[in-house]
Image (cartoon, rainbow, N blue to C red):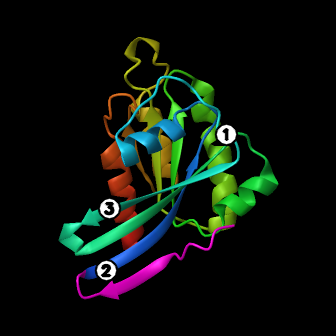
């Protein structure tokens, strides 16, 4: 477990927030690639299976709210080992649920991921991402299906590409705003 504080610090230069975000979704949907694009503006075509949990941080400035948020982004292997997941979800203040538009089963599995998540966290802000939209000719579902799932969890949805960066920054930024309002 991590000793990273999650909460709010008020300072003369504005609010400082620290929020834990969990990435959920099947293996190879692009969770790690989305994090790398958001945090480091990098993309690698080579798939590397995530082993265990990787934690990455990024400070996001919300000027209009006079707030800086440290997003502590937890990336876990895509398998659903319940004991591991339960401890992974503890303390999460937001989640990004990722599916791959070229594999419809990854969208079908997201409700199971979100049920496991909310069983531990209760209702938290959720953003659903349909990733790999750059693979237009291989797309098996579209925005309507993703929007339906996001609405079911009172969340937002985005079509993203970790490769091109489309929608990535906006998705994380939006989740941060949602977490500030909760």
Above-or-below relation of 165 to 8: above
Above-or-below relation of 134 to 64: above
Q: Which residues are magenta?
A: 1-13
Q: Earlier in the sequence, mark 1 or mark 3?
A: 3
Above-or-below relation of 114 to 29: below
* Residue position for label 3: 60
Image quadrant where residue 181 sits: bottom left
Residue lying furthest top: 137
For label 3, the crowd category at 10 Å Cα-Cα, with few meaning under 14, some 14 to 19 and many 20 or more, is some
x then y, percent, for residue 61: 27, 64
Q: Residue at x 36, y 62 (%)?
A: 59
x then y, percent, for residue 124: 52, 65
Whether the magenta-drawn stretch holds residue 10 is answered as yes
Asked whether the beta carbons under mark 1 and mark 3 sit within 8 Å of each other, the answer is no
Q: CA distance from mark 1 to mark 2?
A: 34 Å
Quadrant showing the C terminus: bottom left
For the residue pair 104 and 13, the one nearer the viewer reads as 13
* Residue position for label 1: 78
On residue 15, which mark appears? 2
Q: CA distance from mark 2 to mark 3?
A: 12 Å
Q: Earlier in the sequence, mark 2 or mark 3?
A: 2
Kindly state the secondary structure of the residue where label 3 is placed.
Answer: strand
Task: Count all numbered tags in the image, as a single digit.
Answer: 3
Q: Earlier in the sequence, mark 1 or mark 2?
A: 2
């Amino acid at each position: 477990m991590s000793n990273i504080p999650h909460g709010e610090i008020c300072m003369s230069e504005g609010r400082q927030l620290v929020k834990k975000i969990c990435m959920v979704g099947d293996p190879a949907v692009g969770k790690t690639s989305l994090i790398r694009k958001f945090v480091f503006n990098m993309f690698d075509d080579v798939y590397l299976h995530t082993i265990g949990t990787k934690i990455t941080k990024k400070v996001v400035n919300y000027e209009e709210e006079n707030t800086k948020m440290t997003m502590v982004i937890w990336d876990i292997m895509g398998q659903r080992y319940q004991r591991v997941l339960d401890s992974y979800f503890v303390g999460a203040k937001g989640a990004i649920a990722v599916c791959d538009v070229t594999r419809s089963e990854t969208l079908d599995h997201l409700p199971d991921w979100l049920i496991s998540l909310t069983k531990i966290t209760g209702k938290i802000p959720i953003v659903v991402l349909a990733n790999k939209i750059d693979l237009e000719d291989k797309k098996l579902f579209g925005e309507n299906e993703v929007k339906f799932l996001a609405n079911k969890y009172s969340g937002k949805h985005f079509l993203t590409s970790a490769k091109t960066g489309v929608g990535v920054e906006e998705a994380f930024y939006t989740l941060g705003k949602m977490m500030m309002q909760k």
